[in-house]
Image (tube, rainbow, N blue to C red):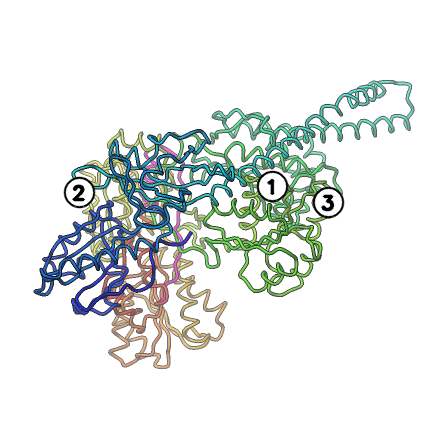
Amino acid sequence: MSDSISNTPLNVTERGLVCRFTKRKSTFICTYFDGLWLLGFNQEDVNGKKLEDIFPSELSGIINKYCYQAWNGQFIQYETKLKGNDYIAFFAPLFNNGEIVEVIGTFIQSNKSSLENEQVNTNSLYEDVLQTMSEAVIIIEKDGKVTALNENFQKMIGLKGDYTYGWTEVEYVAEDGSHLPYSELPGVKTLEKGISFHNSIVGVKDNENNQIKWLSVNSKPLTIRDHSDRASLVSISDITERKEMENTYIQAKEEAEKANRAKSDFLSKMSHELRTPLNGIFGFAQLLELDDSLNDQQRDYVQEILKGGGHLLNLINEVLDLSRIETGKLKVSIEEVPLLNIIDECINIVEPLAKKKNIRIQKQLDPQHDMVVLADPVRLKQILLNLLENAIKYNRQNGNIMINSYLEGDDQFVHIVDTGVGFSVEEYHKIFVPFYRVEGTKEEGTGIGLAIVKQLVQQMGGEISVRSKKGQGSEFCFSLPIPKNLKPVIRWEDEVESIKKVEGRSEHYRLLYIEDNESNLNLVKNIIKSHPSYTLLTANNGKEGIKKAALEKIDLILLDLNLPDMNGYAVFDMLKAKEQTKGIAVIAVSANAMPQDIQHTLDKGFDNYLSKPIHVKEFLNTVSETLNNTITQNIPHHTILSTGPYGEEAVSAKTLQLSLTELKKIKEKKYRAAIAMHYADNDWSKSQIAGVTSTFEKMGIEVIAVTDAQFKWEKQVEDIETILIQKPDIIVSIPVDPIFTASVYKKAANAGVKLVFMDNVPKGLEHGKDYVSIVSTDNFGNGIEAAHIMGQELGGKGKVGMINYNADFFATKQRTEGFEETIKQQYPSIELVAQEGLTDPSHGEKVAVDMIRKNPDMNGMFVVWDVPAEGAMKATEAVGKSDLVITTIDLGFNAALEMAKDGSIKGLGAQLPYQQGVAEAILAGYALLRKQTPPYVAVPALRVTNKNLLEAWRLVYNEDAPDLIQRTLK
């Protein structure tokens, strides 16, 4: 359907202007303006500008008011002055698909003698605009008289003669096909009751051709000047083509579902029929097994019968389950289920099987969370048993199985990892297709079990995925929802901005469907139409499909196997032979649903298989799974490299969260907290404090004090002594000195105060006994990032000095270690020629000057954090060493400004202080709830250069970079 607004420039006399505005929220934005000479503008000056930025202030208010009235369907005319001259102004709505999308305004210079001529010109302008619309626009008056504002009304209604009153004699139908009286038409009801209608569906009967023309009708009450009677403004769009497509889609969908149900019903009946003779075979074979008169050979025969019968019975049961799921006859009964109990029960059942192969089964479960899921206990047990039996069946002798479970977001995840034969990446999604068997496997099986597992998991509201490597083993992971009262309401990743999306991941996918059947093409087009993240391209034969795949940027191909010019397998082979197309995922689409044909197709290398008739939900799931596998595959995991002060393994802050039940418990107690900083007047500390206090506020915890020790351990001891007088429940703190402050922290711990530390821990204090946790950024990782920036800036060779911190501070030590190890191991042509320490960050310039003078040929310097790095930056100016490359840790304002200038600081590893503060507050909540806490928690490292400076600033500080940095970077 074409737009109702013409893009042809409107004729304007030299005595007037024409403008168009669209509404965004509560503001009118200019989309077209002719006659700008009156206001002293050029065309490019006003496009996209707000109304009030174009017109003089004395006019913008009244024009804004009339634009609102026109946006509500009214036609406005009034007199005004512009640049000292009299003008007649007109405002009217413009429609598109029955909705007002713009307001048009005209200003025509008037003198009283030519007023009538100006009115004629304006009316002509309105008529031109209305005639460009694809919709019919009419006004209905109280007596039923219709005034058509363009020529489309007669065509749509099908009237050949006078339509003024004749339209009341037309036969109308409602959307359900029933008769629709004239009095129930939207425009008539608007006239009678003053109410508006939007996208009402009305049919007009064409008795000559026995057809119905479908219309979308919008109507609004209309006030016409000089008339006291009420009228209605009606716009009508012809949607017959759209309705026909909808009906075709619905019919095809119903036929597909009917066919799928028929298939599953057949399987179900066949399964039941097969059980009757099998009962006799299996039963009499068991009786023979008990017969003592059988010789050894006869007993072997009986065992073969029993083994084959058991395999067939298992196959029948699985086919029956699959058919019940597909026909909707298998119902799950969802309830709160203790996951740990079910896991233990399943392990006990499969333990004898594991012992036969000397396979060890281990559990690694999250002790910090209640393991309760919403599931059907019987079906959950079926899922776990199937996955565990496969992990044993396909495992090696003396192998291992690890069961891992944890809470992430609103779901409980279960991982089952084995050390078995594994399979290729190409088979990840094939193994969930019914009857598929892993390549090269010699184990017996039906190929149905995993298909049932997937369906059951999805029926219970979860998802399942797999990872595997040939010769090393497989990892199956499924998720299930948790009860509402256990869902996290405060969690680390919700409280902070997420890290930049991994490069290469796409939010929009282009699909190519190669198919010659128009009905099938239309069905898929209508399915895809409802998913804006997909764009569908089509080809009617193999040659056209191969050409389009090579020329267009395609993410996924849907390939019919029976094409008019060549078969689908030949098309597939040609796609995989071409460099441009060999990496595109391909799903086979075929009416053949026999297991051996599906297996053959998947063995050829297709990524997935869809059987006709297409089942809409299965189709969308298969497309989504295939895209997720092929496009997001091999995305690197962001690993935390730091360890805690005593070598503890880091736990990611992303795992921290509090449920609604837990939050209520914390709020009820009205806890109080204090924050004792080493130094509070830099960007890092301010952001850290903001993260802690904002999260405490959500937890209902009052912050009674925030102190600043100004890097003096004596003052920090005094600060904490003063805080303890106020009897806080929690202290979040970063020790100035781990030795000299230890006694006061010990005193706080003995008083029952929950201690959460930033970046360092006092000597002699024990995790779990004296303090909750220590939280830091991945300092080792940031040291690595600083080293890589240095190596790249120096081109992999040169001489570098290091300025570290002369204190027992594990965070700064790890930064230095990360930098030093990376330079030595990955940049062998860079020589570390000097290393100096400082005890006061204000001494950075002095230490740097001394180092440069002792090593005049040095061309790089690493400084352990940004404050002394600022001193090093001044040192380069003082000694005339402007080409010295500096890298550091921490994104402070001055360091960021220097990077924006492309000055001596070329890049740094950034901490995430706000995110760190959020983690510290949540851990305090854990302690108040007496939940187990990890000794060391870390947030990720972040590399920052002037290329990602603005984005990094937003991530680190939860706000845009200061204007000076933004202006300098431009």
- Up the image or down, 46 lies above or below 653; here it is below
Mark 3 Cα-neighbour bin, 10 Å: few <14, some 14–19, many ≥20: few
Q: State the residue in front, 337 or 247.
A: 247
Q: What's the CA distance linking mark 1 and mark 2?
A: 72 Å
Helix, strand or loop at label 2? It is helix
Task: Give the residue at x 27% y 32%.
Answer: 667
The amino acid beneath tag 2 is Thr
What residue would you read off at disc 2? 722
Name the quarter where the C terminus is drawn: bottom left
Residues drawn in magenta = 918-945
N-terminal of the pair, mark 3 or mark 1, is: 3
Helix, strand or loop at label 3? It is helix
What residue would you read off at disc 1? 614
Residue 665 quadrant: top left
Q: Is residue 931 magenta?
A: yes
Q: In the figure, is residue 708 to the left or right of 953? A: left
N-terminal of the pair, mark 1 or mark 2, is: 1
Q: In the figure, is residue 909 to the left or right of 605? A: left
Q: State the residue in front, 876 or 899.
A: 899
N-terminal of the pair, mark 3 or mark 2, is: 3
